[in-house]
Amino acid sequence: MKANTTTVSATDVVATPLSASCAEVLARAEHACIGVSPFNSYFSVARIRQIADWATRRFARVDFFVPDRPSAYTLEALGYALARAEWKARRQGQYTRNKIRAAVEGVDVGECVTRVLGWAELQGVAAFGQLHAEGHALYERDDGFRAACREVSTWVLAGRLPDGQAPEAAHIDSAVRYVLAELPLFLDTPAIVQAEASVFCYHQPPQVLRRLYERELVRHPAAGQGFAVITMAAS
């Protein structure tokens, strides 16, 4: 049976939860974690400002998540040498942080508390470290979970490779580290940011995340964890 969901819109942003439980978390409006991907032209300053305007008026707290250091894993999978991949990831991560700051400065955030979370901020959080380690352990021991993570990695790489070129197993082995680095934010952001409820917001989730939030995988999101697909309303 398809879960009942509620689409929430404001200004130019439409948020659609992935499941009924995600809809409940979205309605609580306590905390939003906005995913902002480096190397993705979708996230212009103007686009981030639209999202920030919506999020800071709706939620009490808003964090912008930038997977800066983990982006090096994807670059390695695409053929970059380790040092070059890490340098490009750092540079693009800082550029993305600067875009977020510029966008938020153009918004009246009122009493909403905003932050930017990248690898430097997260690696010192005990809950994040525990979830990250748990994801790696589950990847090693559970065939279904491993297949789901590799499916996401294939999806990520397919968007970066020339048309008609499929990633090889070795490429996926490298890129899956990016997926495992993001996974804690999909499983239990409330524990990481010390909130009762949090909704992760992104514009284009892989199909596996729908299965995750429908509790079809061996690991389920924590109570209070939600996900919403955010898109721009048609003008």
Image (cartoon, rainbow, N blue to C red):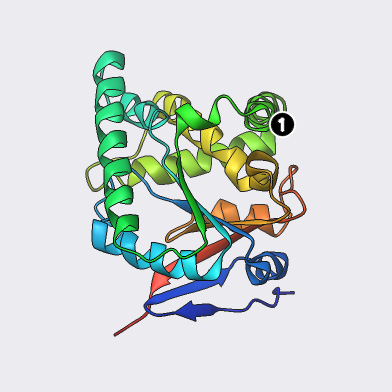
User: Farthest residue toward the front?
Assistant: 111
Task: Give me the residue at 34% from left, 67% from top.
Answer: 50
Q: Amino acid at mark 1?
A: Asp
Q: Image height check: is 81 above or below 172?
A: above
Residue 184 rendering spot, x and y as whole percentages:
61, 38
Q: The residue tagged with tag 1: helix, strand or loop?
A: loop
Task: Give me the residue at 48% from left, 51% from top.
Answer: 114
Q: Left or right: where does residue 170 sit relative to residue 58?
A: left
Judging depth in this view, the residue of 169 and 18 nearest the camera is 18
Residue 126 rendering spot, x and y as whole percentages:
67, 27
Q: Image height check: is 87 above or below 229?
A: above
Residue 72 rendering spot, x and y as whole percentages:
35, 27
- Give residue 89's quadrant in the image: top left
Q: Quadrant of the N terminus?
A: bottom right
Judging by the rendered image, the residue that carries numbered circle 1 is 142
Residue 132 rendering spot, x and y as whole percentages:
62, 29
Number of residue marks: 1
Task: Give me the residue at 52% from left, 38% from top.
Answer: 182
User: Farthest residue toward the bottom?
Assistant: 235
- Give residue 59's quadrant in the image: bottom right
